[in-house]
């Protein structure tokens, strides 16, 4: 498990942009089951989270349509919450970072690590915006 002083600034990148920090199994379950659209980010300490996922996700919110609810778990830190989030993301294999869009509790769009790693934030943002335009309008 990573030390809190390392993780907190990385959590804050999303929390300061409107994401709920989900730290328990119960919080994840309640979050996913909300009506409407839900964006759930599996955050990570890796370079592709710092260089692509977090900035891309934040950029994606500059769109006409956006998810109704924003949340995040942190891999390697909020262990139980992350495990539960990954259960909700099945049949996709565990991945961090990862970004999942749910509509009325069902997963409708997924970005796995291989969709994030090596991609610029703008490409990640554009991918998510297309999903928002389809599912959040």
Image: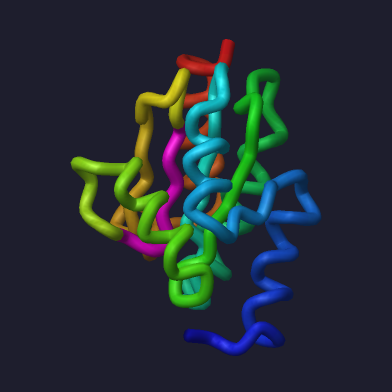
Q: Is residue 126 visible?
A: no
Q: Position of residue 66 (x, y in %)?
A: 64, 26
Q: Residue at x 51, y 75 (%)?
A: 77
Residue 119 vs 57, above or below: the answer is: below
Residue at 80% in and 55% down: 16
Q: Is residue 123 above or below residue 32?
A: below
Residue 107 appears in the figure: yes
Residue at image coords 74%, 64%: 12
Asked if residue 43 lies left or right of residue 12, the reply is left
> Which segment is the magenta one?
95-101
The x and y percentages for residue 73 are 53, 58
Q: Nearer the viewer, residue 135 or 129?
A: 135
Residue at far top of view: 137
The residue at 45%/47% (across/down) is 99
For this view, does 24 lie left or right of residue 8?
A: left
Classify residue 52 as left or right of residue 97: right
As for residue 96 lying within the magenta part, the answer is: yes
The outermost residue toward the front is 26
Front-lying residue, 63 or 23: 23
């Amino acid at each position: 498990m990573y030390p809190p002083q390392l993780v907190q600034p990385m959590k804050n990148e999303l929390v300061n942009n409107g994401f709920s920090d989900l730290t328990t199994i119960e919080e994840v379950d309640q979050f996913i089951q909300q009506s409407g659209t839900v964006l759930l980010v599996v955050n990570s300490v890796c370079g592709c989270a710092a260089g692509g996922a977090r900035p891309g996700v934040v950029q994606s919110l500059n769109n006409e349509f956006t998810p109704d609810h924003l949340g995040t778990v942190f891999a390697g830190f909020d262990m139980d919450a992350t495990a539960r989030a990954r259960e909700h993301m099945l049949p996709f294999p565990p991945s961090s970072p990862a970004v999942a869009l749910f509509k009325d509790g069902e997963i409708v769009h997924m970005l796995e690590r291989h969709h994030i790693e090596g991609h610029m934030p703008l490409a990640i943002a554009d991918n998510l915006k297309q999903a928002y335009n389809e599912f959040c309008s």
